[in-house]
Image (cartoon, rainbow, N blue to C red):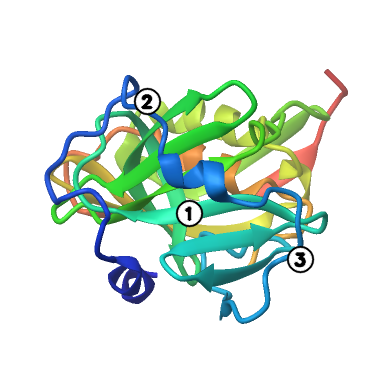
């Protein structure tokens, strides 16, 4: 992913260090996107995370703009962003099975959602994104599920709280000793690494959010755990 981010920097984008806040004006480039239309001919294909996600997604670069068609015409668009983003903590799948920490700020432009994401560490490379409407939310509620953890003692009292948060993720009952690791730095969780491909029915982003919410352990810079889910009585 980081290789791709280096490629997307283009002339005419905001200068490095320019602040990004929720009060910032919507990016004017989004108004020129032909929403709902097929990808134009001649785009340069893009199949890397976090943009080309999902089986139906087809993305391509048209100049400095990345256009994505999720099956019904252009539904997402991105441009390079240089500089920090002062927003809520936000995780993206950055490469392979690793999810990276950053910050995101978003605003509703009426008929269009716009957001910025950037790494929390310099040089903060990231992007501005736009979509015709807000992305659908994924509910973490489902069957009554119990998740047990093998490892993770470094989290202390929070370990049981984390198990409960993982159990609330959609598809958690399909977990069977699924391994993951949380890597930390001075600011807290830096990466969540899935050490294999989880079952297709599991809401992976929910697993990442739950694991990243655990406090930084007093000793060590990483925590590895194995997750096992089992269906219990319905809630």
- The residue that label 2 is drawn on is 157
Image depth: mark 1 or mark 2 in front: 1
x 26%, y 57%: residue: 12
Work out which quarter of the rendered image holds the N terminus and state it.
bottom left
- Image location (x, y in percent) of residue 196: 58, 69
In the displayed structure, does residue 47 sit left or right of residue 213? right
Task: Tell which residue pokes out farthest to the right in this image.
Answer: 234
Q: Which mark is residue 78?
A: 1
Check disc 3 and report the residue beneath it. 55
Image height of 4 relative to 65, above or below: below
Q: Are dots 3 and 2 in contact, CB under 8 Å?
A: no
Q: Quarter of the image holding residue 193?
A: bottom left
* Residue 226 in view, yes or no: no
Residue 74 in view in this figure: yes
Q: Is residue 45 left or right of residue 96?
A: right
Mark 3–mark 2 distance (CA, rounded to whole Å): 39 Å
**Residue appearing at x 66%, y 32% in the figure:** 133
Q: Earlier in the sequence, mark 3 or mark 2?
A: 3
Tag 1–tag 2 contact (CB < 8 Å): no
Q: Nearer the viewer, mark 1 or mark 3?
A: 1
Q: Which tag, 1 or 3, sits closer to the chain's start?
A: 3
């Amino acid at each position: 992913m980081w290789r791709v981010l280096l490629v997307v920097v283009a002339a005419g984008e905001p200068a490095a260090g320019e602040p990004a806040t929720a009060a910032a004006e919507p990016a004017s480039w989004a108004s020129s996107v032909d929403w709902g239309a097929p990808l134009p001919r001649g785009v340069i294909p893009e199949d890397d995370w976090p943009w080309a996600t999902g089986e139906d997604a087809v993305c391509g670069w048209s100049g400095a703009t990345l256009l994505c068609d999720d099956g019904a015409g252009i539904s997402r668009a991105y441009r390079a962003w240089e500089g920090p983003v002062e927003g809520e903590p936000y995780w993206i799948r950055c490469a392979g099975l690793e999810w990276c920490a950053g910050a995101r700020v978003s605003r509703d432009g009426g008929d269009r959602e716009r957001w910025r994401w950037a790494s929390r560490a310099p040089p903060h490379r990231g992007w501005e994104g736009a979509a015709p409407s807000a992305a659908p939310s994924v509910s973490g509620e489902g069957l009554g599920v119990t998740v047990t953890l093998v490892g993770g003692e470094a989290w202390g009292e929070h370990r049981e709280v984390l198990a409960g948060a993982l159990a609330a993720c959609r598809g958690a009952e399909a977990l069977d000793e699924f391994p993951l690791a949380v890597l930390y730095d001075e600011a807290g969780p830096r990466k969540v690494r899935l050490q294999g491909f989880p079952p297709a029915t599991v809401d992976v982003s929910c697993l990442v959010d739950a694991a990243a919410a655990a406090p930084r352990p007093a000793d060590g810079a990483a925590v590895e755990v194995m997750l096992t889910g089992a269906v219990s009585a319905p809630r």
